[in-house]
Amino acid sequence: MLRLYDTRNRRVEPVLAEGARSMRMYTCGPTVYRHAHLGNLRSYLLSDLIRRVCERRGVRVAVCRNVTDVGHLVDDSEIDPTGEDKVLARARAEGRSALELARSYEEAFLADTLALNIRPPEHSPRASETIEPMIELIAKLVEKGHAYATPDGSVFFDAASFPSYGEVSGNRLDRLRPGHRVAGVDERKRFHADWALWKPADRELTWESPWGRGFPGWHVECSAMSLRFLGERVDVHTGGIDLRFPHHEDERAQSDAAVGREVVAHWIHGEHLLFEGRKMAKSTGNVVLLSDVAEAGLDPLAVRLAMLEHPYRRQMNLTWDTLRAADRTLRRWRSRVAGWSESPSRPMPAERVAAVEAAFDDDLDTPLALRLLRELERDASIAPGSRLEAFLHLDRILALDLASEIGRTPSLPPGAAELLDRRERAREAGDWAASDRLRDELAALGVRVADAPEGQIWS
C-alpha cells in the first residue's frame, strides 16, 4: 500500500489501513485571480499521482479540490493579514467584475490540468457558492467556545482554545510573535495569534451573516468545504509546502475544534519549484505558464515527465533544457511503444513491473520508477510485446499518453520488428558488425535506423 511522508507526524507511513478500499482526499485548490504557473501546477500533480497509485491498487478515491474565488487577501503571509481580496484587486486592474474574472481564470486552470492529464475531482466547490456551510461552521465554533465575535462584526478563532496548534508546521503558539507588517496587536483580539473567520465589509463579494455583512476568512473556507463534501474523516490532505503555515495549521484547528477529534489523518506537502535557479513568482518576474511551454513547441506532458524526474518532497530546479530533454524522452517512448505494438503481445515482465510499482508505493519515488522504466526500455532480452504491455500498464500512473502514436506511426514492413529487436540485442552485446548488417537489411525494407545515446530510433 502507498506510503507517504506525513508532515504532522514527521515520518513516512501508510496512508490507508491494510485492506482499505476507499480514500477521501482534499486538495487545496487555486485562487482564481491569475493564470496558474508551473510551480502551482506541481502541487496538483502530487495529488493526481496519489490518486492514480491508489486506484491501481483497487482503491476508490474521492477527491475534493476547492476553487477560491473570495476571501484570499493580497497579503496572507501574516497570521491575520489585512488588505484587499486578490480577486477584487485583479478584477479592478482588468476592468472586469470579480466573478467574471474568477470564472475566466478557473476555466484556464481546468484547461491546464486537463493538458497535464490531471483527473478532475469528484467535488470542486467554489468558495462564493459555499458561504452557508462556512457560516454554519463559524457559528458552531462560537457555540463551542473556540471562536468569539467582536462589536464591529468580526469573528475570530480563539487560538488558545486549541492546545495542539502547531503540530503541522511546528509553529507553537507560545513562540509566535505579532507579524512584522501589522502595526501592533489588533485590539479586537484576545491573543495576537487569533485569526479572522468572518470579516465585516460592504462591497462586492460580501454576504449577510449573524454578525453582519461581510466575507469569510480564507482559512475557514477549506475547513467548511472539506467537511461538507468529504465528511468528518479525510484520509489525505495535500498542498504546497507554503500552505503549512498558517493556512493548514489554521484549517486543522478549525476542523478539529468543530468535530471534536482529528479530521485529517495525513498531511502531505510538495516542495517549491524553481525555474532556472530562481523562485517562480510574479514578484521576481520568473513566471512560466503551461502555455509558454506549448508556444516553445514542447508537449505539455513534458512538464509532467520532467516533474516526475524529481521527488515531490525536494525543491526542484526546472529549466528549459530539462523540459526539452523530457520532451525528447516523451517522443521517444511514444515511438518505441508504437514500434513494439507491431510485434505480438506478450505477458508483462511481472518482476520488472512490480519493481516500478513498488517505487511509486515508496513515498512516490518517481525518479527510481523512471530509471527502472529506462532499463526496461533498453533490455532487448525482453520481447517487444512484453515491453509494450508493461509501458501501457504503467502509463495508467504516469499518464503520459504513451499509446498516442500507435496506429499513427507508419506500420513496419513484415519482419522489420524482429530485425529491430535483433539489432538492439546486437548493440547491447557490442556486436557492431551484426548491428551494421541488420541496419542494411532494415534499409532494404524501407526502414531507416539512427543510433542515439538512449538507443536506436527508427522511421
Image (spheres, rainbow, N blue to C red):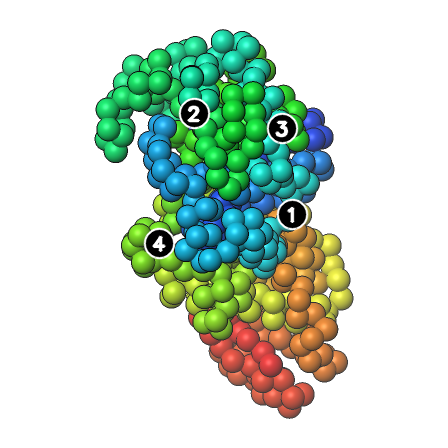
Q: CA distance from mark 4 to mark 1?
A: 27 Å
| Location of residue 389 (image quadrant) | bottom right
Residues at circles 3 and 4 in contact by the CB criterion of under 8 Å: no
**Cα separation between marks 1 and 2:** 31 Å
Residue furthest to the bottom in view is 444
Image height of 430 relative to 81, above or below: below
Q: Is disc 2 surrounded by few (<14), some (14 to 19) or many (20+) residues within 10 Å? A: many
- Quarter of the image containing the N terminus? top right
Identified by mark 4, the residue type is Lys
* Closer mark to the observer between disc 3 and disc 4: 3
Q: Secondary structure at mark 2?
A: strand
Q: Mark 4, mark 1: which one is toward the viewer?
A: 4
**What's the mark number on residue 132?**
3
Residue 56 visible, this angle: yes
Depth check, front residue: 104 or 212: 212
Residue 339 placement: quadrant: bottom right
Q: Residue furthest front?
A: 202
Circle 4: element type:
helix
For marks 1 and 3, give the one nearer the viewer.
Answer: 3
The three-letter amino acid code for the residue at tag 2 is Ala
- In screen coordinates, is 79 left or right of 130? left
Q: Quadrant of the C terminus?
A: bottom right
The residue labelled by disc 4 is 282
